[in-house]
Amino acid sequence: MKRSWLWMLVIMALTLVGAVGVLAQDDMVDTVGLGGNDDLGAFLVGGESGMTLYTFTRDEPGVSNCVDQCATNWPPLTVDEGVQPTLAEGISGRLGVIARADGTRQVTYNGWPLYFWVNDAAAGDATGQGANDVWFVAAMPTVGLGGNDSLGAFLVGANGMTLYTLTRDEGGVSVCYDQCATNWPPLTVEDADALSVQPGIPGEFGVAERTDGSQQVTYNGWPLYAWINDAAPGDSTGHLVNDVWFAAAPPTLSAMDSEEFGQILVGPDGMALYTFANDTEGTSACVDGCAVAWPPLTVGADGGPVAAEGLMGEVGTIERADGSMQVTYNGMPLYGWINDVIPGDTTGHNFREVWSIAVP
């Protein structure tokens, strides 16, 4: 997929749509939106200012190492206490918040702290790109996690569009060429080193060579494709076409290793899941503000939960008051925690002595 095509598609497909945060209002602009320029294509921008956002390779996921004069030149993107940052519609990935030494709350994208650059003068400027070989515009990864109300979570490309697999492909080898490849454009990268994936998504990503020499991205060995008839992020009109095309989706529920707890349960984004002591088997007592801080793990209206291979225990669903279907494990409803920033975080465990990390 050529950069110019990607950039045009993103501009047509994405708009800054207000979303509700913990203390946000319906008409507020999202914290992080999508912008870009002709040289670099699409990248993330501050929602209100539209100014380019950057990441710093000397940071670590969930940790900022830019302080003092560095933070003067590269002002962190921050939010006020009590405000949960939001992504504009169609942008894959996850926002979080970390505490800085000065007490401010810096926004992270897929765990990486976000910054502006003091020398950018107008929206679309990206003069900080490549500065000292450690500063780079923040962009969506090659493969991220998106979804919709119908199917729940599924994989998306860097343009936010749904990705698919073809059941006729076997052994990592694509059989989709000519007109098929026109209708179902393969997701390709220059080489394996150019492949970037949203951290935490369960499963294996790689590349497979096509007959023209291009490198097609694979998920658990299955080549990935877009669908020409999807018009905007969130569309999944290619799902079930001819009963051989399916939206590519990670398992709803998986187990991952944790140094503190051994194995823990995680959702399709790889983030830790929790149980609530005030729940009873098959019933959730976490609603309203509680459900904002502890988002229920849900599945789409047209699909049930899928457990990763080898996961023991009974996986089911219950219907919540809003009609959504919440995933349960051995009868207990499962939740995320708004203050976890990166996969592996378990900061919600024992919160107020009623929240516990979910284990298989």
Image (spheres, helix red, strand yellow):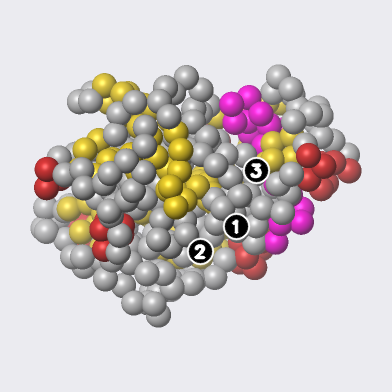
Tell me which label, 3 or 1, sits earlier in the chain.
Answer: 1
For mark 3, give the secondary structure. Answer: strand
Magenta highlight range: 213-231
Q: Are marks 2 and 3 in contact (CB under 8 Å)?
A: no
On screen, 253 above or below 27? above
Find disc 2 in the rendering and name its residue: 89
Give the mark, 1 or 2, whose residue is nearer the N terminus: 2
Front one among 239 and 54 = 239
Residue to which mark 3 is pinned: 247
Label drawn at residue 11: none
Mark number displayed over residue 234: 1
Q: Position of residue 148 (x, y in %)?
A: 56, 55
Q: Residue at x 36, y 44 (%)?
A: 282
What's the amino acid at mark 3? Ala
Residue for point 41% across, 56% down: 320
Q: Are marks 1 and 2 in contact (CB under 8 Å)?
A: yes
165 sits left or right of 203 in the view: right
For the residue labelled by badge 2, is the local secondary structure a helix, a strand or a loop?
A: loop
Nearer to us: label 2 or label 3: 3
